[in-house]
Amino acid sequence: MINGGIVPQSYGKTQQLEEVLPNELFNHPHCYDHREYGQWETFVAAKALDELGYEVMRWYTIEKDSFGPLIRGVDVKKANVRQTFWYG
């Protein structure tokens, strides 16, 4: 749960990124690394989303602590429908 069960919605439907991307992508060493997550988002997750027909609009932090992001969000568009995914 995020923020007491409320996941911020930028656009339309919101769901976990793990529900659409293959599980093995989340085992990548940069996925949950507080310094390298941006590399994972840009070169691994965005590529996988593109292959599924999603256009990545933006990545952003939903929740963080002093070590860095705890939950990240990504706004995407597919067939002119906007959607938000989150992971963390």
Image (cartoon, grey):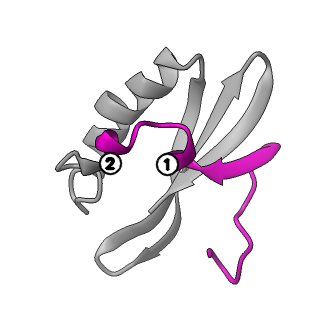
Q: Earlier in the sequence, mark 1 or mark 2?
A: 1
Q: Could you tell me which secondary element the residue under label 1 belongs to?
A: helix
The image shows residue 16, relative to residue 40, as above or below, that is: below
Give left or right: position of 37 versus 69.
Answer: left
Q: At 76% from the left edge and 32% from the top edge, which residue is drawn?
A: 82
How packed mark 1 is, by other alpha carbons closer than 10 Å (few <14, some 14-19, many 20 or more), is some
Q: At 70% from the left edge and 83% from the top edge, which residue is drawn?
A: 4
Q: State if disc 2 and disc 1 touch (CB < 8 Å).
A: yes
Q: Quadrant of the N terminus?
A: bottom right
Give left or right: position of 83 versus 74.
Answer: right
How many discs mark residues in the rendered view? Answer: 2
Residue 76, how many percent across, how many down? 64, 32
The image shows residue 19, relative to residue 49, as above or below, that is: below
Q: At 32% from the left edge and 32% from the top edge, which residue is drawn?
A: 44
Q: Does the magenta run of residues contain 32?
A: no
Name the one closer to the observer, 61 or 45: 45
Residue 45, how many percent across, how many down? 39, 34
Residue 84, how many percent across, how many down? 67, 45
Question: Spatial distance from mark 1 to mark 2, Cα to Cα?
Answer: 8 Å
Give left or right: position of 50 versus 67.
Answer: right
Magenta region, main secondary structure: loop
Q: Which disc, if any, is residue 53? A: none
Q: Tell me the residue that label 2 is attached to.
A: 26
Amino acid type indicated by mark 2: Phe
Which region of the structure is painted magenta?
Answer: 1-25
